[in-house]
Each structure stands twice: as C-alpha cells, then as structure tokens.
Image (tube, rainbow, N blue to C red):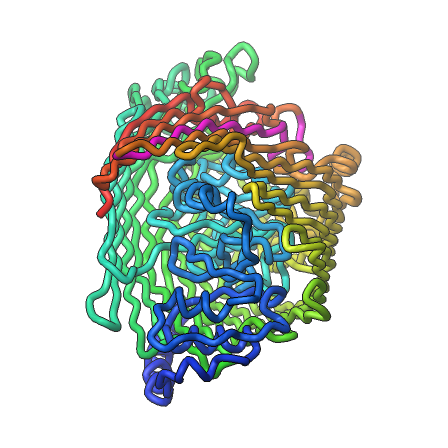
C-alpha cells in the first residue's frame, strides 16, 4: 500500500485553530504614544509596529543605545516614526512593498535619484529567515527584483543561469525536465532523478522543494528572487552545500491593484499573465495570478533519416524496424498553464495567516538532443546529421506531462514586544511523465519513459526576538516528509530488450536549529548557529527484464541477474554549525567573515536500477566552508560587494564505476573549491530627469578533485586534479541601463551581456563532455505611459551565438538562438 505524507491535513487544522486562539487572547489596545518617549529606540519601534500593524526594519547597529523622541498624538504613521527618530541621525524609508526601513540620514543629493536607483541599505530581504536590509545581511546574496525578473525573462529556476554569475546548469536526458543547478561549482555531480539529493535548496515563499524535479516549476507574479550562495547548513539545513534559492511571490495589497500582460515573440511564442489583488474586507485580502505560455520551439525534426526501417543484421522479423515520424518544424513548443491564489487574514495587528494554493500543467515538447555532423561521428549512431545544431533526427518526437499542485500556509504572530512566532507549512504533489533518449539519434542505445509521482509535506516553526537589543536570535524546528514513486521503462537496442525499474522511496527528516548575532558594540557583532538533523529513508523496488523479442542480452551487458528485488533502509544524522563576525567600518562599509559546515544527505541512487549493487546506500557529503566579504554603499548610489570563499568537500557524491563495472551513485572522494565574486552597481551619469547606470557581477572559480575512488585505474588517473563538473573558471554579467522621465511617460533601455566559461558536464570528462565558452547579448526597450500602459520589446542572444547547455560525446543540447518579442502591460 502506498504510504503518503499525511500530517499535512492535521497540521493545517492545528494551524488555523492556533491562529484563532492566539488572536483571541491578544490585547492590542493602542497605547498613548507619549509612553514611547524615552524608551530604547528599538523597543519603541517594535511597540509602534504592533500598534500600527506595519513592518518596520530597524537594524540593531543603528538603533542600539538610542532613545525614542516624543511623538505627537494623532500623527500619521510616517510622521510618528520621523518624530521618534528626531535627533538620532536616522530616517525612515518606505520600500516598494510598504515596509519602513530605518537607515542613516543620507545626503540631499541622493534624494533625487532614490526613485530610480536601489541601494543595498534599502532592499529588504529574508535570507537570514528574518527581515533585514541587504547591506546588513552577512552572507553572499544576489537579489533579483520584479523588474529584473521581467527584463531577463525568468520563467523558472533554470532561467537563473546566465542571469547571475557563478550559476550553471546540467541538463541531463532532455533539458530542463531533468536538470540540476550548480552554484560556485557545487552541484555538478548531482543526481537528476526525483529521489536524489540536490546541492541547491529550492524554496518558494520559504517552502523547501525536496527534489530537483521542481526546477521546471513556473515562476510568475514574483516580488523577488533571493539567491544565497555557498553552504547554508545552519538556517537551511540538508542539501544546501551549494546554497539556497527562494522565489517570493506577490501577496494581497492594501488597495486594489494588478496588471495584465500579453507577449508575442519568435517561433510563435505567446505568453500571457494576469494578476490582481486587494482587500475583500478590513481584515481579509486576496490575490489571484494566472499565466500561460505557448509555442517558442526553435528546433526542426528531420525524421528518422538513414535509420528509417533499419533492423540490426540477423534480427529481421524479430526486432521492429525504426519508424519514421516525418519532418516537424518548430519542435520544442511550450504548452503551460499555471494559477496561484493567495488569501491573507489579519486576526489582529501583527497576527496574520496567509494561505496560497497553486497548480500548473506543463504539456510541452521535451527539449531534444541533436548529434554532431556525420563526418565527425560514428556512422553506427548518426542518421545523417549536418553541422546545424537546430536540426535533429529522431524516430519519435517526445513530449512531457508535468502537473504540480499544492497548498502553502504562513502564520505570523507577535507574542510580546520582544518575541515573534512564525509557522510555515506546505503540502504539494507532482505527477510527471517524461520520455526521451540521451543519444540524439533515431536508433538510440537507450530510449526511456519516466513516470514519477512525488508528494511532500513540511512544517517549520520559528521563535525570534525583535531587532534592537544586544542579541538578535531565532530558534526553530523543521520537519519534512516526502515520497517518490518512480517507474522507468527502457527500450534498448544495446541490450536488445525492453525492461523496467520501478521503485519507491520514503524519507522523513527532522531538524532543530538556532542562530544568534551578539552586538558587542554598535560596530561589531559575533554570530553563531547550530542545526541538528535526523533522516530516515526507506527504498524498495524491483527490476524486470520483459525480453519481448526473446533475444535479451541484459545479464551479459549489465553483468547482473535480469530480475531482482530489493528493500533497503538508511538513517543518518548531522550536526552543522557556523561562526561569523561582522564589523562596520562606518555606515557605508562593513566587513564580515565566517566558517561553517553543511551537508548533502546520503541515501540511494535515483537513476534507474539495473544491478543489485546500485541499490546500496551512500553516505552524506560534507563541506567545510570559509567565507569573507565586504559591502559598501555611498550617497552617490554606488553599491559594491566582494566575497572570498574556500570550500573543502569530503565523501563527495557522484556516479562512478562500481565493483561490478556498472555506473552507480556512490562516495567518490574529496574536492576543493576556491574563488572570488564581486558585484558593482553605480550611476554613470545623472540629470534631473534621466540616469545611466551600470550593474555588473563576476565570479572566478578554481575547483579541483583532490581524491578519487573508482574500480577503474584509468578513471582515477584521468579524474584526479580535474575541475568539478559545472564549475566554469569565469562567469559574469553586465547591464547598462538608460532611464528618461518624459512629460507623460517613462522610457527605459537596457543592454545585457553575460559570459560563461567552458565547463565539463560530468566526472571523467573528455573532449566530448566540455561545453565551450560563450557570450550572450540582450536588449530591452520599454515605454511606460502614465495611463498605466507599458509597451516593451526585447531581443535575446541578438548576435545569434551558437552555444550548448550540454555535450555528451556526440550528442549535444543547444541553447536558444536569437529570439525577439514585443508585448504590452496594463497596470491598474
């Protein structure tokens, strides 16, 4: 009987009941504002936040040791805070989401540019699981706001590649549907199957996504995307050796607002998005967002080519001949629909419950490999390819069906002036049916059908104090339960058979964590955290050789019995920790350094199981991380960040040759990663109504496999000293932007450049597994009318560069050619 994660329904009921009970026992009578005068400023701001039901971000370093000034009765929210800050050298800034951010008073010449230039001390993030400004967040963090997300055309997690430096993707077996992300060279040896342990922890609205299978989930109507780079074992836990990505969606607003966008582009690409939100009552707010995509396929199928009707010699009448599906232009079309509904209910000031329901249906074409030209390839595999990577040969045009749905909840309650409670819960499921082959030929050695059912439920509860005291702290518990039911059906001309590998995996994980930052002075603080995690995994399945033609060579090919079953268990525990220090040289410059550990969970091979040895568990991968960095902002709009890092890995997980000479996931050795990353944003030229600005970032990596274990001596010799997969030495981005304020409109032009150095796709990489370096150039023009109508046009890869996401010997997965499009958005 299928065992499902079941505590979701009980948790949801308990969450709603707890919300009502906490709200009913809360007394939020407005205090006389005269009572705030003379209090410690941090405490007074916290109390005012409760009274007025607003978010106030007050960095401890700024408000510590300061007293609140008197506030007049009946003052507006912003005036009350400004009066409270009088004489403190501080001011309040309201960000685009309504939060009030306390910052040091800026020079007058910065005021005119504040509407067009964002500074790190104004951007509110939640990377540390509590709201803070980007300038005060002591981790390597990249943030993309809603405008940048639109500019770069980000529709899912995989689109972050070439949008941020230091990020790569390995698109194994069919593109984004079976992929994994690397950050700073970590994650390139991941398992792309649904039960594998990713190195990058994906989150949507703070809810952990347990599998790489969710990489292709549509992202739309976003407030921002936060990318935390480097190991994050303390706050984010298991499977964060590379970092964490959190996509934060838009929620209900205080007034009715929304937008509708329609876009048309190259290869009959069509996209539409609608979102609207606002109050339904004085306590209840709602938002609805929908999106759809169609078309955009840029590859041309040539049919089966030379293999049409082919049957291996001696097997005529036994094995069916290769079929010819005919030609098909514009292959790779999207067919996507997604919806998200959000409800936010305020029981009382600072006590609210947010519920989000989402669903998506993706029935598009599966990205196809092509092969190198016939004169450069083995004729035994090549159907007659030329050098054009946008043309391919196939005996079947593969598509996929991916359905995702779920419910997320978030409950926030301020227990007292100094104590907050946050509860996050999530439940979601996915049904995936993906087919393809990794050879890029119409006579594939291995053709697969993957049928997957994923289900997960999670609960996170955190207690934290309000900022402004000598110690900022939070502590919590995290629980996640996930299940994977996976059936892979194979048709193999190499094995002369059809065979199946059905399995199921159940994992339960519980973690306790705590993190604190102690301010020894206004300028210097020490931080530390611990996280203890336990995991229990059950893995069972079987392998079946159907042998439909009676000529199977399964046992001789895999050196294994052809029919077998297994039932395994694996348990693990881990203690991760981090120590950090932060020093403010002045209000413009701060320095930080840290040392910490993280781990990628052990478990079982997620690829199809063809031998009993592949069913054995492997241990957790561990990393020791050293990091140091600086953040600098000034009154002229310059933002600078610089990060140095070094990582040491043990029990590195990867696919290697096992004792029976078949491929399987195991612990293969040790590795090191060292590097530097920098980002710069500044205005190049400013006038009363226009500005030209530059944003740029660059990442340099030096990775090396220092110890490697394999049953093949040549593999050991060829791998030692190699860089890790997915670790280009150099990657970077630059954007030049021009903005002009006109009488009744606002014009913006943006030129984007990205560079990605060569990188390997896997361990033991030969020439056929090294993707060459490439550069891409993009352009976007936008005219926003004061009536609410925005017209835009864009071009991506406008120089039409040929580049590859993956090379696998003679098979290759090509990136998109030059594409152009235009659209309009009406905002209300």
* Residue 532: quadrant of the picture: bottom right
Q: Is residue 450 magenta?
A: no
The image shows residue 322 at horizontal and vertical percentages of 37, 24
The image shows residue 236 at horizontal and vertical percentages of 57, 62
Classify residue 821 as left or right of residue 452: left
Q: Magenta: predominant secondary structure element?
A: strand
Instruction: Tell me the magenta residue range.
Output: 744-766
Q: Is residue 47 above or below residue 519?
A: below
Q: Residue at x 60, y 44 (%)?
A: 183
Q: Is residue 759 magenta?
A: yes
* Residue 738: quadrant of the picture: top left
Q: Residue at x 49, y 73 (%)?
A: 45
Q: How many marks?
A: 0
Classify residue 541 as left or right of residue 299: right
Q: Is residue 357 above or below residue 476?
A: above
Location of the N terminus by quadrant is bottom left
Q: Residue at x 54, y 39 (%)?
A: 164
Q: Residue at x 44, y 62 (%)?
A: 100
The image shows residue 57 at horizontal and vertical percentages of 50, 64
> Which residue occupies the foreground of this view, 316 or 390?
390
Q: Is residue 820 above or below residue 789?
A: above
Residue farthest top in this picture = 375
The image shows residue 209 at horizontal and vertical percentages of 46, 57
Residue 490 in view (yes/no): no
């Amino acid at each position: 009987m299928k065992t499902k994660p079941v505590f979701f329904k009980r948790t949801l009921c308990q969450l709603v009941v707890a919300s009502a009970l906490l709200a009913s026992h809360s007394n939020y009578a407005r205090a006389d504002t005269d009572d705030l005068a003379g209090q410690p400023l941090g405490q007074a701001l916290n109390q005012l936040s409760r009274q007025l039901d607003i978010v106030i971000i007050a960095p401890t370093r700024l408000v510590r040791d300061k007293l609140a000034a008197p506030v007049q009765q009946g003052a507006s929210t912003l005036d009350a805070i400004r009066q409270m800050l009088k004489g403190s050298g501080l001011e309040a800034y309201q960000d685009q989401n309504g939060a009030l951010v306390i910052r040091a008073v800026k020079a007058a010449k910065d005021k005119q540019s504040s509407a067009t230039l964002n500074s790190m001390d104004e951007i509110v993030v939640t990377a540390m699981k509590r709201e803070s400004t980007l300038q005060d967040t002591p981790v390597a963090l990249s943030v993309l706001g809603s405008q940048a997300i639109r500019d770069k055309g980000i529709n899912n997690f995989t689109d972050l590649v070439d949008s941020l430096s230091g990020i790569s993707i390995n698109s194994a077996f069919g593109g984004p549907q079976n992929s994994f992300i690397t950050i700073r060279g970590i994650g390139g040896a991941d398992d792309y199957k649904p039960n594998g342990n990713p190195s990058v922890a994906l989150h949507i609205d703070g809810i952990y996504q347990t599998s790489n299978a969710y990489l292709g989930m549509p992202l739309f109507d976003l407030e921002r995307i936060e990318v935390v780079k480097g190991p994050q074992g303390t706050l984010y836990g298991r499977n964060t050796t590379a970092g964490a990505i959190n996509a934060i969606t838009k929620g209900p607003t205080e007034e009715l607002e929304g937008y509708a966008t329609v876009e048309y582009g190259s290869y009959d690409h069509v996209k539409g998005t609608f979102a609207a939100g606002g109050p339904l009552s004085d306590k209840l707010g709602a938002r609805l967002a929908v999106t759809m995509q169609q078309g955009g396929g840029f590859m041309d199928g040539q049919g089966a080519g030379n293999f049409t009707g082919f049957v291996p010699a001696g097997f005529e009448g036994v094995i069916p001949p290769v079929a010819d599906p005919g030609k098909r232009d514009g292959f790779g079309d999207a067919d996507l629909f997604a919806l998200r509904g959000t409800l936010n209910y305020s029981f009382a000031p600072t006590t609210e419950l947010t519920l989000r329901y989402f669903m998506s249906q993706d029935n598009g074409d599966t990205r196809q490999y092509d092969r190198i030209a016939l004169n450069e390839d083995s004729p035994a595999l090549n159907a007659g390819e030329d050098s054009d990577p946008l043309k391919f040969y196939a005996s079947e045009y593969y598509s996929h069906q991916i359905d995702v749905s779920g419910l997320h909840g978030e409950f926030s309650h301020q227990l007292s002036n100094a104590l907050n409670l946050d509860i996050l819960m999530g439940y979601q499921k996915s049904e995936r049916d993906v087919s393809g082959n990794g050879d890029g030929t119409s006579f594939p050695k291995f053709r697969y059908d993957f049928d997957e059912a994923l289900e997960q439920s999670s609960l996170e509860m955190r207690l934290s104090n309000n900022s402004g005291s000598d110690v900022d702290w939070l502590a919590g518990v995290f629980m996640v339960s996930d299940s994977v039911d996976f059936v892979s059906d194979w048709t193999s001309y190499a094995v002369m058979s059809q065979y199946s590998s059905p399995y199921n995996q159940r994992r339960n994980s519980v973690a306790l964590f705590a993190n604190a930052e102690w301010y020894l002075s206004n300028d210097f603080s020490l931080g530390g955290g611990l996280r203890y995690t336990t995991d229990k995994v059950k893995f069972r399945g079987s392998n079946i050789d159907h042998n439909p033609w009676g000529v199977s060579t399964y046992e001789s090919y895999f050196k294994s019995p052809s029919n077998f079953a297994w039932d395994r268990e694996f348990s693990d525990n881990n203690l991760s920790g981090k120590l950090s220090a932060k020093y403010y040289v002045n209000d413009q410059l701060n320095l930080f350094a840290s040392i910490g550990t993280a781990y990628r969970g052990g478990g079982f091979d997620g690829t199809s199981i063809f031998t009993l040895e592949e069913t054995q568990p492997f241990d957790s991968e561990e990393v020791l991380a050293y990091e140091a960095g600086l953040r600098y902002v000034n009154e002229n709009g310059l933002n600078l960040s610089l990060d140095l890092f070094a990582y040491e890995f043990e029990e590195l997980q990867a696919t290697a040759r096992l004792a029976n000479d078949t491929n399987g996931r195991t612990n293969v050795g040790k590795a090191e990663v060292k590097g530097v990353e920098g980002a710069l944003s500044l205005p190049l030229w400013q006038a009363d109504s226009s500005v030209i600005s530059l944003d740029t970032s660059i990442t340099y990596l030096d990775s090396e496999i220092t110890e490697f274990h394999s049953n093949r001596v040549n593999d050991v010799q060829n791998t030692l000293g190699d860089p890790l997969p997915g670790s280009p030495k150099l990657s970077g981005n630059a954007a030049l932007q021009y903005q002009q304020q006109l009488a009744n409109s606002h014009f913006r032009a943006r030129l984007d450049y990205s560079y990605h150095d060569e990188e390997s796709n896997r361990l033991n990489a030969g020439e056929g597994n090294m993707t060459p370096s490439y550069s891409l150039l993009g352009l976007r023009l936008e005219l926003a009318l004061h009536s609410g109508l925005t017209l835009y046009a864009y071009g991506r890869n406008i120089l039409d560069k040929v580049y590859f996401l993956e090379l696998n010997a003679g098979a290759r997965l090509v990136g998109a050619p030059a594409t152009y499009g235009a659209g309009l958005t009406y905002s209300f």
